[in-house]
Amino acid sequence: MSEGLGTLHNVSDSLFDVPGEHASAEPGADAVFRRDSGAPLAVRLRPANLDEVIGQTHLLGPGSPLRRLVEGSGAASVLLYGPPGTGKTTLASLLSQATGRRFEALSALSAGVKEVRAVIDLARRRLAAGEQTVLFIDEIHRFSKTQQDALLAAVENRVVLLVGATTENPSFSVVSPLLSRSLVLQLQPLTPDDIRAVLARAISDPRGLADAYTVSGDAIEHIVRIAGGDARRALTALEASAESATEGAVDLETVEATVDKAAVRYDRAGDQHYDVISAFIKSIRGSDVDAAVHYLARMLAAGEDPRFIARRLMIHASEDIGMADPMALQTATAAAQVVQQVGLPECKLALAQATIHLATAPKSGAVTTAIGTAMADVSRGKAGAVPPYLRDGHYAGAALLGNAQGYKFPHKYREGVVAQQYPPDELVGTDYYLPTDHGNERTIAPRLEKLRRIIRGK
């Protein structure tokens, strides 16, 4: 790179693995992103122009902010947010070719405030000479608040056009001032057809395998399944399988022997964490036991804390099942105890049992509605005096105050129930618990109706 970037060379090297190679006076993708024959297949196959980009059509339509930026006519800073292998670094590579712009790259894994300020100072000098700088920061979510704050003035004044790449939702990982100054563009996981197209290109392209290998359809489909929408993972699997192939043939057995575990897109601190647990609970609520078990497996495979899952099951047992199946809460609580006392991997069986119980149980939101409505009444001031005969009478002088006098002890009556006012005056006749006709609540409803008639003297 040009003058003033001596402290940044190692940062760029650590991001792009190009020892000793830096952008020239006329920056281009090849000068920043290694493409020689010794580079990994995923790097060699990185698109050289927008026409080679597979997927992300929702972001690359004519006149879109991202296309305009890549083509050199846009002037907005952007945050590219999406799972691994969906094209964030590829788009950064294409930005390096934008007409009339210099390209600088930092990795949040190794750069600090000093390196950020050095790039900004260089960009400011270039801007004074009529030259604009694109600053690409990989894994920007790993920057601290102080490091992100160091970018604010330069981004706001367009000293640099920031392109940040992150696998985590910027709403959770990027400071609000920087977020408000940037376009947030979400990249989607590549579809199976997209991954097939990536593999087909890799097999035939001179930059790739150049038709030196035959790859069976079963092998391709297996790579598609394990890639999880990640093009980089698919290409890495293909390359490793080709290296293990005999007589230039890659078959299913070769791929299975090389790569045996599928990618799981999940982050325990960001939106995948919340999205998957949300889908898990909603699947249980919707009584789709198969979907619920899938999301449970997905969380466990990704290393989610089983205690977190157990807590959500206990909450759900009361929130969405309640008295329709009182045993649901006991099952969820027992599963949480197994998690605590046994741990992984064995506790996954108890979590699965609780998930299946809750998903197949009759559902009722009556408990949630009852406590929610009661709490709302209390917050509105409906909390009158406790009737005197219900008050505590276990202290000297209580009787003189009229407390606990005239209380009717239910066990003295034949049915164990007696007409007597229990709520404050302003809440007499209020029904908070409204049982459904689902599961156990089907038997509670008629009994509750009879109890209320007796208690209220009707």
Image: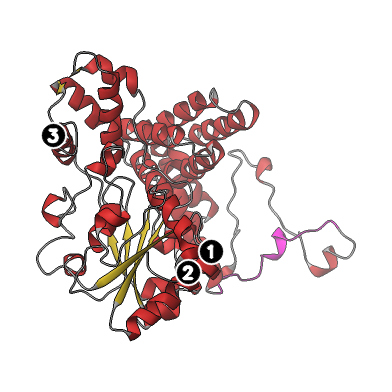
| Range covered by the magenta-colored residues | 381-394
Residue located beneath label 3 in the image: 200
Q: What numbered label is drawn on residue 214?
A: none
Task: Looking at the picture, tell me which residue is in the foreground, 129 or 223.
Answer: 129
Residue 153's place in the image compared with 7, above or below, is below
From the viewer's perspective, is residue 183 above or below residue 329? below
Question: Magenta span has 56?
Answer: no
| Position of 428 relative to 303 (above/below) | below
Whether the magenta-drawn stretch holds residue 392 is answered as yes
Residue at horizontal 36%, vertical 41%?
265
Q: Earlier in the sequence, mark 1 or mark 3?
A: 1
Q: Amino acid at mark 2?
A: Val
Label 1 – label 3 distance at C-alpha: 40 Å
Residue 116, numbered circle:
2
In the rendered image, which quarter is residue 202 located in? top left
Q: Position of residue 327 (x, y in %)?
A: 50, 32
> Residue 95 lies in what quarter of the image?
bottom left
